[in-house]
Image (cartoon, rainbow, N blue to C red):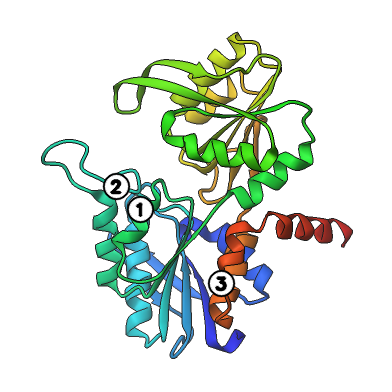
Amino acid sequence: MKEEMAIVSGRASRQLAESISNYLHIPLTKTTVEQFKDGEIQANYDETIRGKNVFIVQSTFAPAENIIELLMLIDAAKRASANKIIAVIPYFGYARQDRKDKSRTSIGAKVMANTLTAAGVDRLITIDLHADQIQGFFEFPVDHLYASNVLLPYILNMKLPNICIVSPDTGGTKRAVTYAKWLGCDFAIGYKQRAKANEVESLQIIGDVAGKDVILIDDIIDTGGTICKAAARIKELGATSIMAMCTHPVFSADAMEKLQNSVLDKVVVTDTIPLKKQLPKFEVISVAYLFAEVIKSVMEHTSISSHFEMVQKVLEHEMAEKMK
């Protein structure tokens, strides 16, 4: 398998890519990415990848240069005679633009899908797309993973006495219900009204959170406004403890400071996007193991359906790691 594949890292996801390569016991393929004085990016492979399946790990969060760098790595792999090019995009940028929500507006997720197709991608591996239907924008296979496979074991290991899962908005209801069913606990929903994009005007909690250990679950935390408002309202309603969990810590502007200074006891995120700084309330859980297992399945042509429900497997893996 090692001779047939190459794992490549973009600069935006270097740490995660290294973790994936460590799990697979395959060193990262050496590349050189240059950025010229005018901002242009050029990518080059420093060793042969001819005939190999190339897995390029790069999240596409801001700045937009991260997207351009990914495209250049894809193009360089195609011109270097790679057999297959698999884009591993832990955080798929522009996923929130999945439909026309007003007249004469763009659908950014579709533009991204078209761009990756044109660049030469043969397959996409990603996790927690903002909208599941985005998978249909692609003309090639999409392996869509779920961060619940690492977040649920974390919740179980905390052994909280009275858990209540809360979605900060109605869009995350399905996610909250799924977590609550798995944990056998109550759930509640936040109902928010926005004054404008990225600005919450009011937020109410539908459900009983009094005396509960509340876990706010979301796929993305951007400005932190919704989570902080939800946490404040939940505190007013008498929750015992409040923790926020999300897959993609976008954390625009002063979001981290806002969350640090909020009533939240802890903020747990995954490493699809590296944190800009370390603050006391924040904890990072890696999704490297999930991606490594799926990459292995792709290479060995085995089913990946089990990876969509692999909470038990993750628990077993964590136990094995502790015993080393």
Mark found first going from the N terminus, 1 or 3: 1
- Amino acid on which disc 3 is placed: Ile
Q: Which mark, residue 133?
A: 1
How many marks the image carries: the answer is 3
Residue found at the very far left of the displayed protein: 104
Q: Callout 1: helix, strand or loop?
A: helix
**Residue at 29% from the left image edge and 52% from the top image edge:** 109
**Residue at 61% from the left image edge and 40% from the top image edge:** 179
Q: Is residue 103 left or right of residue 214?
A: left
- Amino acid on which disc 2 is placed: Asp
**Residue at 40% from the left image edge and 67% from the top image edge:** 33
Q: Which mark, residue 98?
A: 2
**Where 170 sits versus 75, above or below?**
above
Q: Is residue 171 visible?
A: yes
| Labels 1, 2: front one | 1
Q: Could you say which is closer to the camera, residue 142 or residue 274?
A: 142
Mark found first going from the N terminus, 3 or 2: 2
Task: Name the image quarter holding residue 265.
Answer: top right
Task: Name the image quarter holding residue 299.
Answer: bottom right
Measured Cα–Cα span from mark 3 to mark 2: 26 Å
Where residue 274 appears, as percent x and y from the top left, is 54, 48
Where residue 134 appears, as percent x and y from the top left, is 34, 54
Q: Callout 3: helix, strand or loop?
A: helix
Q: Are marks 1 and 2 in contact (CB under 8 Å)?
A: yes
Where residue 307 appears, as percent x and y from the top left, is 60, 63
- Amino acid on which disc 1 is placed: Gln
Q: Which residue is mark 3?
A: 295
Q: Is residue 29 visible?
A: no
**Where 4 sits versus 163, above or below?**
below
Q: Is residue 174 left or right of residue 148?
A: left
